Image (cartoon, grey):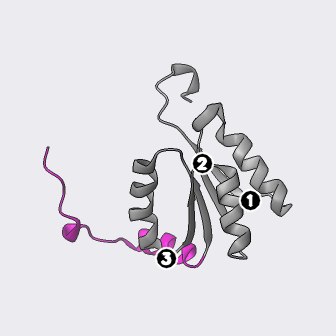
Amino acid sequence: MPLGDARKIVETRYAAAITDSLHDRVMVVIDDSSDVLNSMKANIDRWGCRTIFATDASQALVELISSDLEPDVIISDYHLANGEKGFKVIDQIRQEFSNEIFSVLMTSDPDPDRKS
């Protein structure tokens, strides 16, 4: 299947509004797959977010704290390395910042019990 031509994509007013609302927001993306992180980076960079890409909570927290940033959004994979779960990573980051940070949990797990 041929790849689409990105130059032919027309940005709608809706997409522009979303992009504008995300501009300068601090977003944390956590996944243990470098392919997923690179793919997410390619998309999120266009939104103008200040983004931390990490493979676990420790790395995310070190980068956030050393950059003096507090996240507005957390996106995490459900299944991370060493049996770690994304919801626990999200909780760790929320606890560190004592804040209920908007979060998205994602997975490509084919288990039908995970689909809703």
In the picture of the structure, the residue carrying the numbered disc 1 is 101
Tell me if 92 is positioned left or right of 108 in this view.
right
Question: Is 66 placed above or below 101 here?
Answer: below
Q: In the structure shown, which secondary structural element does the residue marked by tag 1 occupy?
A: loop
Q: Are marks 1 and 3 in contact (CB under 8 Å)?
A: no
**Would residue 41 appear left or right of 98 to someone viewing this image?**
left
User: In x, y percent, where is residue 50?
Assistant: 57, 74
Local SS, label 3: loop
Front residue of 29/62: it is 62
- What x and y, as percent, mark residue 103? 66, 53
Upstream in sequence: badge 1 or badge 2: 2
Determine which of the numbered discs, if any, sits on residue 76 in the image.
2
Asked if residue 72 can be seen in this view, the reply is no
Amino acid marked by disc 1: Ile
Camera-side mark, 1 or 2: 2
Q: Which residue is mark 3?
A: 48
Question: 10 Å neighbourhood of mark 1: few (<14), some, or many (≥20)?
Answer: some
Considering only vertical position in the picture, is 46 above or below 56? below
If you read the primary sequence from the N terminus, does the residue marked by circle 3 or circle 2 appear first?
3
Magenta segment, which residues? Answer: 1-24
The amino acid marked with disc number 3 is Gly
Q: CA distance from mark 3 to mark 2?
A: 19 Å
In reply to whether residue 110 is colored magenta, the answer given is no
Q: Which mark is residue 58?
A: none
